[in-house]
Image: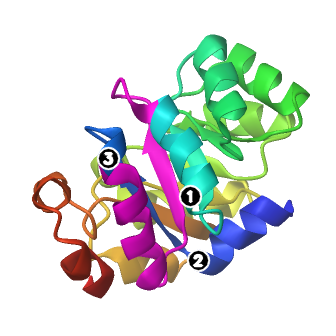
């Protein structure tokens, strides 16, 4: 397995963050790292995402940074140029997958069906995103699919929380989960960094 994916697997829980401003980026990432989560998936759903990745890369170099909600080749290029070491997409787009892998960057595409999973694996994706996980049957669904796709590995997001995280991480084909429960938007806005570190 790729070294970045091994690192993600070792951490097990990847905070998924939608930043509202660049000012939040460094204190939040320092709080996460202090709490034992030196990784983040910065979603491209907000206008400042690219600048946040660039700033974190410079100020908190111990963070493993990915870009999430990447839906186009152009977004992927911007995220990689800013310093993202892996790209996560909500869905499976063969063109984006081909482009990112062609640049030598880890690609984790969103998949739900065995057909999407098989195609992404055949393109060279070592880990697949299962999204939205809970709405699509969660761990039980992946145990069924995993019986056929025995080499498939998943990172699950969407409905994963503090109550069910151990169910997900207890299945050996799930390498990691992503979530927001340890860094919710209202806590970030309020600058509750100590609380985030504790969570």
Measure the alpha-carbon separation of dots 1 and 3.
12 Å
Q: Residue at position x 66%, y 79% from top?
A: 10
Task: Give the structural element (helix, strand or loop) at label 3.
Answer: helix
Q: Position of residue 190 (x, y in %)?
A: 10, 60
For marks 3 and 2, give the CA distance. Answer: 25 Å
Q: For residue 79: magenta?
A: no
Quarter of the image for the C terminus: give it. Answer: bottom left
Observer-side mark, 2 or 1, equals 1
The image's colour scheme reads rainbow
The residue indicated by pointer 1 is 59
Label 2's element?
helix
Callout 3–callout 2 Cβ contact below 8 Å: no
Q: Secondary structure at mark 1?
A: helix
Observer-nearest residue: 192 or 116? Answer: 192
Give percent across and percent down for residue 84. 65, 42
Mark 2 closeness class: few <14, some 14–19, many ≥20 residues within 10 Å: some
- Residue 41: percent from left, percent from top: 49, 50
| Residue 163 appears in the rendering | no
- The reply to whether callout 2 and callout 1 are in contact (CB within 8 Å) is no
- Residue 113 shown left or right of residue 17 in the figure: right
Disc sitting over residue 187 in the figure: none
Please state the extent of the stretch shown in magenta in the rendering. 24-49
Residue at 68% in and 41% down: 83
Residue 60 point in image, percent of width and height:
57, 63
Q: Earlier in the sequence, mark 3 or mark 2?
A: 2
Q: Where is mark 2, residue-wise? A: 11
Quarter holding residue 120: top right
* Circle 3 residue: 23
């Amino acid at each position: 397995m790729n070294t970045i994916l091994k690192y993600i697997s070792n951490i097990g829980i990847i905070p998924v963050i939608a930043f509202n401003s660049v000012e939040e980026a460094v204190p939040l990432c320092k709080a996460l790292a202090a709490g034992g989560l030196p990784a983040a998936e910065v979603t491209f759903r907000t206008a400042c995402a690219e600048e946040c990745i660039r700033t974190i890369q410079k100020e908190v170099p111990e963070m493993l940074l990915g870009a999430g909600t990447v839906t186009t080749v152009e977004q992927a290029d911007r995220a990689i140029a800013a310093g993202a070491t892996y790209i996560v997409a909500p869905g499976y787009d063969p063109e984006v997958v081909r482009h990112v892998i062609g640049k030598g960057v880890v690609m984790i595409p969103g998949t739900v069906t065995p057909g999407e999973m098989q195609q992404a694996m055949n393109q060279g994706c070592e880990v697949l995103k299962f999204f939205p996980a809970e709405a699509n049957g969660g761990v039980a669904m992946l145990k069924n699919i995993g019986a056929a796709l025995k080499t498939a590995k998943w990172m699950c997001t969407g409905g994963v929380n503090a109550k069910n995280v151990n169910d997900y991480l207890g299945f050996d084909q799930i390498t990691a989960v992503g979530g927001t429960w340890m860094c919710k938007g209202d806590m970030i806005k309020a600058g509750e960094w100590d609380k985030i570190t504790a969570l």
